[in-house]
Amino acid sequence: AARSEVLARREGERLPSRRGGDSRRGPKPAARSEVLARREGERLPSRRGGDSRRGPKPAARSEVLARREGERLPSRRGGDSRRGPKPAARQRGLGAEGKMSTLRIEKVSKLYRSSTFGGGFTPALRDVSFGIDRGEVVTLIGESGSGKTTLGKVVLRLISASSGQVVFEGADVSRYKRTQLRDYYRYVQGVFQDPFSSYNPIYKADRVFEVIRDVYFRAMPGPAWHEKIETALHAVALNPGDVLGKYAHQLSGGQQQRLLIARALLLDVKLLIADEVISMLDASTRVDILNLLISLKRSGLGILFITHDLSLGNYVSDRTVILRHGAIVEMGATTKVFGDPRHSYTRNLLAAVPELHRKWRPPAAEGDSAPAITASPNGAAATTDTIGTIGTGGTSTMTGRRSPGASRNRRRPPEPAIALQAPPLTEYEPDHLVAAEEE
């Protein structure tokens, strides 16, 4: 019986078990076919019902291949799968010409209260719109009070815009929360007019670097951090031994400004807001700072250069934006704006630039002050002696003073106010926009 059992096992027959039923020690032809089927990649019935999950799934293979190719896949919860690359996200930061737009300012307006106890609002910005690309310097030029610094503060989220939005690489900056805003400052930094006010006089000047380290580079070892600082200082033509370990009053104005630019370079900065960074420096130091900005532009840094000096803007910028009363009056390539100015305000600014071998002569008389633009009830523009603002009842004055008799007769019809709508821009030539004249 034992011999026949061995022979039967060799032949693959099913033998009766000692406990009853077929013996499990004998080879199972069904199991053999199952193994062969799995090797071939066929779908097998599961013991619990349905297809076996141990066998390879052709659908899963196609899904993996589709993800490698970048196709959009249906999600298990419905809709498109978020794991696949999104073409829309890739195109989100592209400008009209297909270039990556670092920053886009879209119809930004800003109103300030004329006084604490009412009196209306003063428009500082009116529907300002333009963009800044990587490796581009855009100069913002205008007289004092035209809204240049206000726009820089809006971009840096130091103040909020009354309307419009600032879009950085496809995202609205005004919606950033605390963590997102911290990441935003990793890429966008500002350098202001008075460098000394950026330092705490009781601390050494290089403390501005330690503040950056506490927020963004806590895990970086000390030697690596000091090497990073030295690299940033050399990038702005500073000797570490001349500036590190000293107080702000021991440094010159040029050294203080360069130190602040080096602080911005410690981060992955993509956009620099330079607000009158050379107005307090002497002529020799100005050239050094301008050349530094040009070298940073060539490395791919976008720069918003705010100034009232047209010669400096012409020296450093690729595109120029002229502001007047918070609105853009002319905008385009610097060579076109300065070479063929079309707006009267731009011509007046260029005429006021001093020339080396010519005595100064006043421009054509236009009165002590430019007339203000106001909105008449029918929507047409009208001139007044003072610049108006939008008040609580619809109007007030730019000066913030109450009109005569306002306290005695509060029901008097409101006076006309300055139009919040900026004058429309028309294309004079490619990359050269000019606004309608305001009288």
Image (cartoon, rainbow, N blue to C red):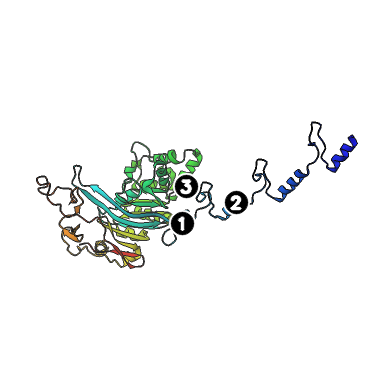
Label 3: state its secondary structure.
Answer: helix
User: Disc 2 residue type?
Assistant: Val
Tags 2 and 1 touching, CB below 8 Å: no
Q: Mark 1 or mark 3: which comes first in sequence?
A: 1
Mark whose residue sits in front, 2 or 3: 2
Residue 64 circle label: 2
Hey, which quadrant is residue 196 in on the image?
A: top left
Label 2: state its secondary structure.
Answer: helix
- The answer to whether one can see residue 183 in this image is yes
Mark whose residue sits in front, 2 or 1: 2
The residue sitting at 75% across, 47% down in the picture is 33
- The answer to whether one can see residue 283 in this image is no
Label 1: state its secondary structure.
Answer: helix
Q: Nearer the viewer, residue 419 or 275?
A: 419
From the viewer's perspective, is 27 left or right of 118?
right
Residue 231 circle label: 3
Residue 277 image offset from top left, x and y in percent: 33, 51
Distance from disc 1 to disc 3, alpha carbons, whole Å, reads: 34 Å
